[in-house]
Image: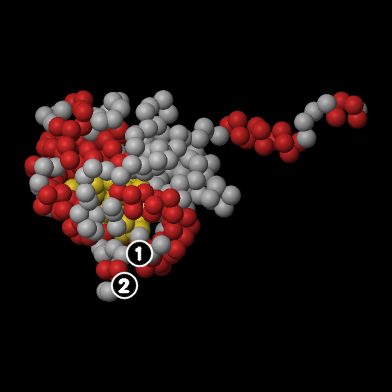
Amino acid sequence: MERRGAAFPHHDQLIAEMTEATLPPLTPPPDPHPRKPQLVAPAGAIDCHVHLFGPASRYPFHPDSKYRSADALPETNIALQDTLGLSGAVVVSGAGYGPNTAHLEEVLTRFPHRFRGVALLPDDVDRATVARLDALGVRGARFVSPGHRGALPRLSSPRIPELVAEFGWHVQFYPHGTDLLEHADALLRLPNRIVLDHFACIPAAGGVDQPAFRRLLDMLDTGKVWVKISGPMRCTTQDYPYSEVTPLARALVRHAPERLLWGSDWPHTNMHGRSMPNDGDLFDLLAAWVDDAAVLERILVHNPREVYGPFGKETAQG
């Protein structure tokens, strides 16, 4: 019996190997050498969509997450902000940690002048928790379309939107494909302002005349909806410069620049089998989308403060 036992791996090692085999693969990391963009950011520019992870030893991924990422630390993102000429960023909770806000709370506590937050909230969240998150700098609650898998809250009840509306929070919604058409009316009935992720995730190949994009323009006209011109890789299968997305971006800029937010979507999770863009190049896409300096300032500086409030020293000065 001893000889047979000695021929097998140690039990703990075997379990670890089995667990590792069942986990999703690590998502490819971002380009570690972001270049300084040619486009000069206006003073006070904000990146309205980043994800942060780690350290993994303290913050393991949610067991239902469909991806894993190496550490994407706030210090690394702050260095990226400095390279791009930005003043701050909005940390958007994703499926990696599910409706657990501990990591977001630590980031906002450690770096209150560089980040604001959008949280995934558990179904049973109470007012005291929302008040605590609000004091730390959370400004929105995120929900996703049923088309997205993973540990993400669905907009199945108005309870949480109504609760966070007391604090002036918006509802951030991540559509899937063209299903904005299915969810638009329900979103507009909520008491909150609405922020849509990544060009509302509308397939760019369908162009500006497709029904979902026309519906998006109508929603912007209500005055209570914003859309992020972020993550162009999320609505096309093309690689950089995502030329299919350019007509949509330009149409949005023409139609409602006062309702647009820009985001990098760093560190660009789930890019398996695709070319990883350089973040300096991503920022320079704005030059192809926006041809007016005042409009660029509106998108990068003024609109973020309307949605997320003040950043950095503005907060310290009240």
Indicate the quadrant containing the C terminus: top left, top right, bottom left or bottom right: bottom left
Q: Give the structural element (helix, strand or loop) at label 2.
A: helix
Does the residue at mark 1 contact the one at mark 2 (Cβ under 8 Å)? yes
Residue at horizontal 23 percent and vertical 42 percent from the top: 38
Q: Which residue is mark 1?
A: 113
* Amino acid type, callout 2: Ala
Where does residue 152 sit, x and y in percent of width and height?
Answer: 41, 44
- Does residue 69 appear in the picture of this structure? yes
Work out which residue is located at the far bottom of the displayed protein and give it.
Answer: 317
65 on left or right of 267: right
Q: State the residue in front, 34 or 313.
A: 34
Write down the residue under mark 2.
Answer: 316
The residue at the point 13 percent across, 37 percent down is 250
Q: How is the image coloured?
A: secondary structure
Relative horizontal placement of residue 2, taking residue 131 as reference (left or right): right
Of 84 and 129, the residue lying toward us: 84
Residue 187 showing in the rendered view: no
- Give how far across and how far down residue 141 sits, in percent: 33, 54
Q: Which mark is residue 32?
A: none
Question: Which class describes the residues within 10 Å of circle 1: few (<14), some (14-19), or many (20+)?
Answer: some
**Residue 118 quadrant:** bottom left
Picture coordinates of residue 10 (x, y %)?
A: 78, 35
Q: What residue is shown at x 71% (from left), y 33% (from top)?
A: 14
Q: Quadrant of the N terminus?
A: top right
